[in-house]
Amino acid sequence: MQGSTHATLRALLLVLLMIIAPLSGCFGETEAPETVDLEVALTIDGLAPSEAVFRAGEWHDLLLMGEDLRISAPAHDVLLFVDGVIDIDSSVPVEGDRINVKLLTTPYTEFVELVVYAKDGTKAVFNQTAGNGTPIISGEAWYEKMDYITCDTPSDDCGSYNFRWMGSPNPAFERAASYFQGHFEGLGYDTHLMRVVDTLNPTQPESLNVVAWKRGLRDDCVQGMGAHMDISPPAGPPGGGTWEGAYDNTAGTVAIMMYAQILVDLEVECDTFLALWSSEEEGLRGSNAFANNDCEACLPQDKELRFYINMDMMGISWPAVKENGDPFPYHAWSGPDVDPEVQDVAITSVLDHVHRNILKAPMDLRIEGSYGAGCDQHWDDHYNLVMDVHEDTFGRSDHVTFRNLGAQTIFHLGAYDEDYSAYHSPQDTLENMVAVVGGQENLEESIQFVLWAAFLEFVLADQDPEVRNVNA
């Protein structure tokens, strides 16, 4: 009985084979689609992918060749730019038969992955460890410029642009403003030395700003970054004034000078100003004069003011540590913060994404104890938080001028008041900054982090349609 069953099964199988064999030719051969050949379709800095080398913090040139191809990268680690504009999705299609893409990693990117997709869904993956590079924005370059500005005796290697007090009249301030103006003009910006006289005395201007303009792709909006270049005058509270003002605010001044070097080769959505304000220490007079007057260099009154990023007192912050081993606080506050219980503005999402996802900052790092001064509405939650990154109403700097006009703002600030005893004092020097954080390398590491944070915030906010004037 068992033998008969086996014989029957064999017979059925033979019948099926005879039926299927002739039909197989009707459907053709079934082969797996070929994957994309990266060595043919992609070059990196003019080299085949197998020969390319990625360096963290640097630009790299990609050329993708082939109709209907698309190149993608993890947006948290690799930034893709097309025609000078960041692609927020980090997924760029070929238009025609080829496309040029600029790739940028942060100094903190350890691994680069690129995926090339074909129209039929096949893909090829390239990955490589990123080596050490020379970042396009570096703490080392910042330090060199700081040293040139704050050194004592003018020479070929020393600018010595100190004593930048706003007053009646101050040749040292005029000389420094002229130097800063030349920096922007040399890069090709439409640059203005903006003098506003409200006292009816030309020797005592209320403001003397340096404003550099870059035209945007649209003509109906405006945005910007800035820092105040004036320093606390003699006898200024709480520390008696300063002559170098390294931390407050030569540090932010140099940051804006560095951004000018990077943004000159990028496209911006809206007309963009890069500004160095005066009279911040006298009540935000410089930025207010720019924002609320009608002049050639002033803020256009017929365009939507989208956002503004402010740099003030930078570099003495995480990851630098104090003498007791606690990290210095790092502050980055967005606004307006109308309701402390909810997120009010879209730029807060940009702020959080940059720190949490791209720069991978330790967002929950806290100390035992509390910091010397806090934010207005959230002190109970943030008194011991190292990465103090959130919406807040905190003022005391030029971002308030633009926040009052409905702009979405970000304010970058390091240690201040009790956490930096040299605040507004003669001890606010570059040498002291180095000593406070335990060495030049530590200072360069700390400033480089915040420099990258603000740069990334700018290029992402520039392309985010939700970042608009709150009154729009």
Image (cartoon, rainbow, N blue to C red):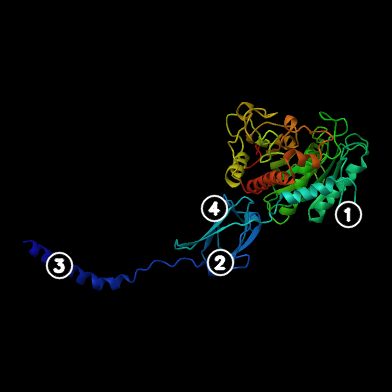
Local secondary structure at mark 1? loop
Residue 180, which numbered label?
A: none
Q: Name the element at disc 4.
A: loop
Mark 2 in CB contact with mark 3 (< 8 angstroms):
no
Q: x, y percentage for residue 470? A: 65, 37
How many angstroms separate mark 1 from mark 3 (CA)?
97 Å
In this view, the residue farthest toward the left is 1
Foreground mark, 4 or 1?
Answer: 1
Q: Earlier in the sequence, mark 4 or mark 3?
A: 3
Q: Mark 2: give few (<14), some (14-19) or many (20+) Cα within 10 Å.
A: few
Secondary structure at numbered mark 2 = helix
Residue located beneath label 4 in the image: 74
Which of pointers 4 and 1 lies earlier in the amino acid sequence? 4
Residue 150 location, quadrant:
top right
Amino acid carrying label 3: it is Arg
Distance between the Cα atoms at labels 2 and 1? 45 Å
The numbered disc on residue 50 is 2
Q: Earlier in the sequence, mark 2 or mark 1?
A: 2
Q: Residues within 10 Å of mark 3 (few under 14, many from 20)?
A: few
The three-letter amino acid code for the residue at tag 4 is Pro
Distance between the alpha carbons at the discs numbered 4 and 3: 55 Å
Image quarter of the C terminus: top right
Q: Position of residue 22 (x, y in %)?
A: 24, 73
